[in-house]
Image (cartoon, rainbow, N blue to C red):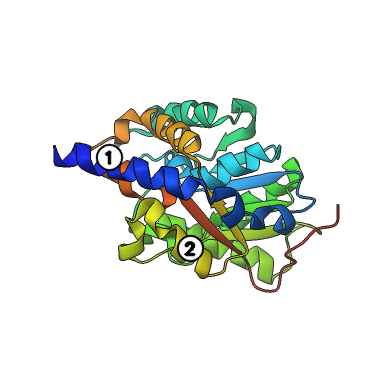
Amino acid sequence: MLALVLVALLSALWCVCSRWRDVLSGRPVGALRGVRAPLLLIAHPDDECMFFSPTILGLLQEQRPLSVLCCSTGNYYNQGEVRKKELFQSCAALGIPASNVTVIDHRNLPDSPNVQWDTHLLSDLILTHIKQKNIDLVITFDEKGISGHSNHISLYHAIRSLHRSRKLPEGCSAVVLESVNIFRKYLSVLDLPISYLFRSDILYISSRAQYRQAKDAMMCHQSQLLWFRHIYLLFSHYMAINSLHFLHGQETEKDS
């Protein structure tokens, strides 16, 4: 009964907050002017819908053909092949074709919360992919990795290294997803006013329909749907809101 009440309350709040969605999420248009080939850089299958679904669906709604580069198969529990298939199913549910999804399976990039991936190896693999796909925007985790996972943080350091060494192709920018504190992490749409007040370069807010689409995508990851993941789907900030920041020193606007 309590769960039903909470779901009903969350739904009502989403209706109210959705009325302000177009006003509060108006920053992406100018910030990403001219972006034609964005890349979502993730560490494991399910990162795409658990953390980045507002960004993914926002970009696709803006008619920006998004690519995904996943840097492991998520083989921590020897489920790599299963999770790889789930990733393609999830991306399809989000509207990303299989041709735009690439999975790296490298023995030196193991799925492990205790392993910091080698920055040089990772940077080389990412840069090769960026050049092959003519990527002009990379989206990934910030220095806290959302959940503190070492693999997530490794992606930040790799992109940061490419940026600092000026190895990213001319015109290619990078943005990182803001990690919020534990209190905000489970406020869902209630965190919308806070996210708006704490200025970000880019703010994506999911509509109710987009939330349902993201939830359907997460349902594709059946191997990962433990009981606490269902709670996460209901209350996670990241299922509703993505605040992103450009890496320091990069351009925040592109020519059309």
Q: Which mark is residue 7?
A: 1
Which label was assigned to residue 195?
A: 2
The crowd level at tag 2 (other Cα within 10 Å; few <14, some 14-19, many 20+) is: many
What amino acid does circle 2 point to?
Answer: Ser
Q: Residue at x 43, y 33 (%)?
A: 212
Q: Residue furthest left?
A: 1
Compared to 197, does 83 lie above or below? above
Q: CA distance from mark 1 to mark 2?
A: 22 Å
Asked if residue 149 shows in the view, the reply is no
> How far across and down, in percent of the image, does residue 156 sit?
53, 62
Expressed as whole percent of the image width and height from the top left, the position of residue 108 reads: 46, 50
Image location (x, y in percent) of residue 123:
61, 57
Quick one: label 1 or label 2, which is nearer the N terminus? Answer: 1
Q: Nearer the viewer, residue 20 or 29?
A: 20
Foreground residue among 237 and 79: 237
Q: Image quadrant of residue 222?
A: top left
Residue drawn at x 56%, y 47% is 55
| Residue, far bottom | 249
Could you tell whether 114 is left or right of 251 in the image?
Answer: left
Q: Is residue 213 found left or right of 131 in the rendered image?
A: left
> For numbered disc 1, what is the local secondary structure?
helix
Along the viewing direction, whichever of 127 and 62 lies nearer the viewer = 62
Q: Amino acid at mark 1?
A: Val
